Amino acid sequence: MTITLDRTDKLLINRLQKGFPLSSRPYREVGRALEIEEREVIERLQRLLDEGALTRLGAILNAPQLGGERTLAATSAPPDRLEEVIQAINRHPQVSHNYERTHEYNLWFVISSEDEADIARVIREIEDETGLPVINLPTLEEYRVEFYYELPVDGAGQET
Amino acid sequence: MRQGTRENVLTDDERAVLLIVQEGIPLCAQPYREIAERLGTSEDRVLATLESLLDRRVTKRLAAVPNHYALGVTHNGMAVWNVPDERVSQIGRALGQRQEVTHCYRRPRAPGWPYNVFAMVHGMSREEVLAKISAISRELGLEAYEHDVLFSTRLLKKQGTRVRDRELRHAPEGAP
């Protein structure tokens, strides 16, 4: 179900996606920019978190800087075995993301671990358990990792 | 490339602050003071710790994370192209400059997989995603290259990067 947001909610989310102030009264600072009270900023954020419009307001960590390795892997699961293969993949705690996608390779998953050998082992285990080949597509170059989706706001131009 | 393991990259103080702020910044007028009180330290110490984590890029930023699905941004397309190896870096960098692209990588080709550049694009409908990708393709001159867009039809698992408490880090497999 889609949550309905008012204009101020959208402006608040767009602004806070980019960053949250590191100062003694951060909500007051945010409120000033949006011309609302500190108390209203806190109340709106509480509601947005309670309703599930926001997953969290917190630190976004930079996985590569924390050490460890990650890769994107994919496999082609036959339709009648789909759920079983999904389970074989998701049961590994090293699998952080898994998506079903529109392609012959229909399951796409991210494996993260402290070391490369562990990633290879997880792939081997998934192959052994499912009998399906897994393609391993590690990042060779990273050009962008910046999840920002600007919510369209009536009467507000593209903010930068 | 490798910056060290999760073991040695963080001090104990940093780990303690991150364990709190990765889950959520307190919703009160002085959230950093609130964190400091929980940890038995000062607000200035907490602010300095976070500043250092941001400077070292261990933390990308403090920010709100929208639940894109709940807000109607339910469509994500993984756009892929097979471009010549000698042009891949230049094309990847150009793709990475686009606001519509959230993630962009060069990856190896594989059996049954001829593509070497990946760009994620999100939107409120398939049409919106496809329109963004066509515009990108046209403007960057990628139309001649072999290309596909893989839409996600189901999110099967998603967990953001987190640091773990030391004692929990080597939890047995299958542990939550």
Image: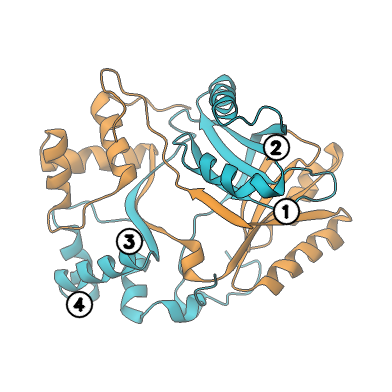
Chain colours: A orange, B cyan
For the residues marked 3 and 1, what is the alpha-carbon distance in whole angstroms?
36 Å
The residue carrying mark 2 is A101
The residue carrying mark 3 is B21
Both labels 4 and 3 in a single chain: yes
Q: Is residue B28 above or below residue A39?
A: below
The residue that appears at 54% across and 40% down in the rendered structure is B95
The residue that appears at 56% across and 31% down in the rendered structure is B140
For the residues marked 2 and 1, what is the alpha-carbon distance in whole angstroms?
19 Å
Q: Which of labels 3 and 1 is toward the front? A: 1
- In the picture, the disc for residue B40 is 4
Q: Is residue B150 above or below residue B157?
A: above
The residue that appears at 29% across and 31% down in the rendered structure is A159
Mark 2 belongs to which amino acid?
A: Arg
Both labels 2 and 3 in a single chain: no
Protein chain holding label 2: A
- In the picture, the disc for residue A58 is none
Question: In what element is the residue under mark 2?
Answer: strand
For the residues marked 2 and 3, what is the alpha-carbon distance in whole angstroms?
33 Å
| Residue A118 falls left or right of residue B104 | right
- Label 4 vs 1, first from the N-terminus: 4
The residue that appears at 47% across and 69% down in the rendered structure is A66
